[in-house]
Image (cartoon, rainbow, N blue to C red):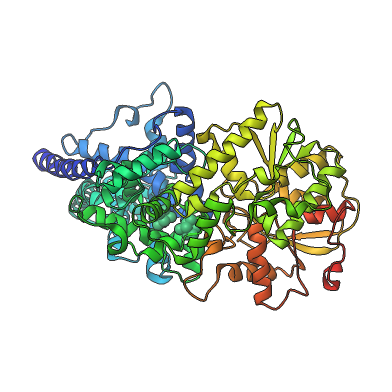
Amino acid sequence: MNPLVMTLLLVGLWGAFAVSATRRMRALGTGSPTWEPRTDRIGERLGATWTFAFWQKKMRYYWLAGIAHQLIFVGFIVLLLRSIVLWGRGFDPSFNLWILGPEPVGGVPLGAIYGFVKDVLALLVVAGALVFVYYRVIRREPRMTLSGEGLVILGIIIAMMLADLSYDGASRLLADPNVPFDAHEPGASLASLVYRGLSPDALSFVAQTGFWTHSTLVLVFLNILPYTKHFHIITAIPNVFLGDLTPRGRLRPLAKTTEELMAKVEKASEGDDAGAARIGYSRIEHFTWKDNLDFYTCTECGRCSDNCPATKTGKLLSPKHFTLDLRNHFNSKREGTTDLVPTVIKPEVLWACTTCRACEEQCPVNISYVDKIVQMRRNLVTMRGEFPAELGKPFEGMETNGNPWNLARVDRPAWAEGLDVPLMSDKPQAEVLFWVGCAASYDDRAKKIARATVRLLRRAGVDFAILGQEETCTGDPARRAGNEYVFSMLAETNAATLNGYKEKGGARRVITTCPHCFNTIKNEYKDFGVELEVVHHADFLLGLIAEKKLQPNNAVRGRVAYHDSCYLGRYNDIYESPRSILASIPGIELVEVPDWNRKKGLCCGAGGAQMWMEEQNKDRVNVKRTLQLLDTGATTIASACPFCMTMLKDGVKSQSKEDEIRNLDVAELLAEACGVGETRGAPPAAAE
Ligand code: SF4
Ligand code: SF4
């Protein structure tokens, strides 16, 4: 071993790494501040870090790649100690870390245990790396970036492991040419078998080569990191730890009040750069330091795009490439010069997003997308007045008539005609406020969901009332489309109404049939001072079944496939209640779309204001989802969202199957089972 060479190696390569890593970290600091603290709730942050960064829960959504990655990750942590030992042996051939030496510590043979674990893991790391070679070279996995860089890194990893085993194997033979296979050192013993019979000089050469190869490659690897996607090895753990712990369904407000927002917009319009930075994002320096950390952390695994409904139907949006385009621009940026749209990101990319969160759910390192896309939409809508023409009517409708269809405000409660539904204004102390939402108020098909819900509430003896004309759109489509002004205005109006009834002692619980209303009132109205218990009707109705206030005794025969709404499932973790309602109904055979259900459920295509936009090419998200549901052989498609229902209804129609397939909300199916349904006259094919 050679102390001088080792000193040069360590000082030179650690020094070079320190310079490039510092440059990268400094670049991170150029981002804007985040809205929320990122070092609070330490226990939760540590929990998330364990679950996602160390246990790598999401990696295993793709099981083979997940296991292979976990092996490499654990192997690297364990082998890091080994690298330190080898660096030390450059100065003193007998060097060992104290607790890993040949002598037992406190009677426990820690060194021997470590040696065994290290040997096994070195072999498993090679196996894990070969899995990724297979993905890249043989399977040529389309979701991955198949660059030479990835293969070079895999080559380095494999070489490091084999070099270490060669060093140990040859050293064993130098000490005893007849050394037997020792199960306590499986890797080194295998290497000894390979090198058995070599002359002492040759063995010494192998040992030296192994030693220097491993010692050097670790440092070379370290120096490659800051310039490649493998920088995630350093940033992934902090990226997870520093994640946003506010509810997933909450987008950050731009201002506390509409008045404050307008003042900001005015300042920004006058060219106040600091103000403009806060009306969404138009340039790369508007992104926060955490957004930049996201860019650095992307592993280019492509799981986000592999699950994105826009990518899957051939739209211009691919979340992975959205991140990579921004990262490349960030790395090459000249401060404050380029508007991102359309030079770096095409507007069609931004407008194709359904805000379904499939990408975020899949991303193993918790990179966020919806907030970035909405921030960019905010800037386009508010500062540049640029948005798809089809959004003009819903924006106007929400602003003037309180609904995106732009229908008369006075017609809002017309759906309840003949049902004698009480109004909160007449019954201000009603315990439950049934928030109907725009879809169930104005869309003829969705009105039936509201009517079924009312019948069920009546049957269960619930003390409820509706707001009638006092209700106005929650603003979800406006907000997701980037129109924060309209959202803020609607949120303030609704907050005043809800808090008014709360003060009168009513509306202790708000129930909704629409996951978008549910998400907005529950997760976003807190920023406008609303603190109420908000319950989706699936949870509420299931509770009534559990209390035996609803008894689904009538058989509803049919094979039923349930479609998960993104805003119910991925945003609010409500996957089981709708299924449990269906399971409680006699006669129903519940089936699932293989793979594409629950967290992985494909979006219906309506979210993020897509309901009111034309899709960019003829491949439709709703048709893709409908085909998945029909492939189960279902005779009924069940949903728990009026927007999903509209999209799936159109999907069924596109296949000319509207006479064979029933499309029902879980409340409608439950109403049938409880004998209070409107839909008992089902098509004949659905009866069996
Ligand atoms: S939120 Fe959905 S549509 Fe938007 S990028 Fe992510 S996966 Fe694609
Ligand atoms: S954003 Fe996440 S899921 Fe998408 S490529 Fe990067 S690491 Fe993979």
Q: Quadrant of residue 550?
A: top right
Image spot of residue 454 (x, y percent): 80, 47
Q: Nearer the viewer, residue 559 or 200?
A: 559
Locate the C terminus and report the quarter of the image it occupies: bottom right
Image spot of residue 587 (x, y percent): 86, 59
Name the residue furthest top. Answer: 106
In this view, 669 is above or below 542: below
Q: Nearer the viewer, residue 433 or 109?
A: 433
Q: Residue at x 83, y 73 (%)?
A: 685
Q: Nearer the viewer, residue 150 or 52?
A: 52
- Please give left or right for residue 520 compared with residue 69 in the image: right
Q: Is residue 101 visible?
A: yes
Image spot of residue 2 (x, y percent): 12, 41
Image spot of residue 676 (x, y percent): 88, 52
Quarter holding ligand 2: bottom left
Q: Residue at x 38, y 36 (%)?
A: 35
- Please give left or right for residue 143 compared with residue 516 in the image: left
Q: Is residue 572 visible?
A: no
Locate the N terminus and report the quarter of the image it occupies: top left
Name the residue furthest left. Answer: 4
Q: Quadrant of residue 347?
A: bottom left
